Image: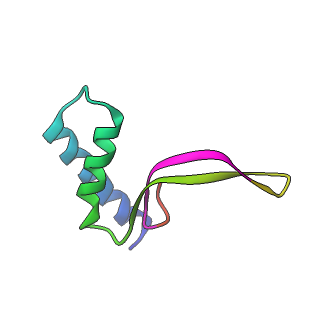
Amino acid sequence: MTENEIAYIIRGGILEVYNTLGAGLLEWVYVQALEYELRGKVVFVEREVLLPVLYKNIKMDLGYWLNLLVNNRII
């Protein structure tokens, strides 16, 4: 699957979540709902993935948390 195909599926999932839940909820609710929408449509969905920071070739586990990582390519 190409990045464009995956992005199309993600956008569809986002619209489905928004149309179902509406606005005003906590971010965590939308992330979990989107993960649910994507699970059957893409190969791999992972939630709360640590993205480490590299500083002078040292891997620091003080990096960023990715809400969702889809097919190991799209954040």
Measured as percent of width and height from the top left, residue 51 is found at 60, 53
Q: Residue furthest top?
A: 24
Q: In which quadrant of the rendered image does the N terminus lie?
A: bottom left
x then y, percent, for residue 59: 75, 56
Say whether residue 61 is magenta: yes
Towards the viewer: 73 or 25: 25
Q: Is residue 6 above or below residue 62?
A: below
Nearer the observer, 6 or 57? 57
Could you tell me what secondary structure mostly forms the magenta stretch? strand
Relative image position of residue 67 (x, y in whole percent): 44, 47
Residue 43, position in %: x, y?
35, 72
The structure residue drawn at horizontal position 31% and vertical position 54%, both measured from the top left corner, is 35
Q: What residue span does the magenta drawing correspond to?
A: 60-71
**Residue plotted at (49% across, 64% down):** 73
Residue 15 appears left or right of 59: left
**Farthest-out residue, left:** 20
Q: State the image quarter where residue 18 is shown.
A: top left
2 part of magenta stretch: no
Q: Is 52 displayed left or right of 41 in the figure?
A: right
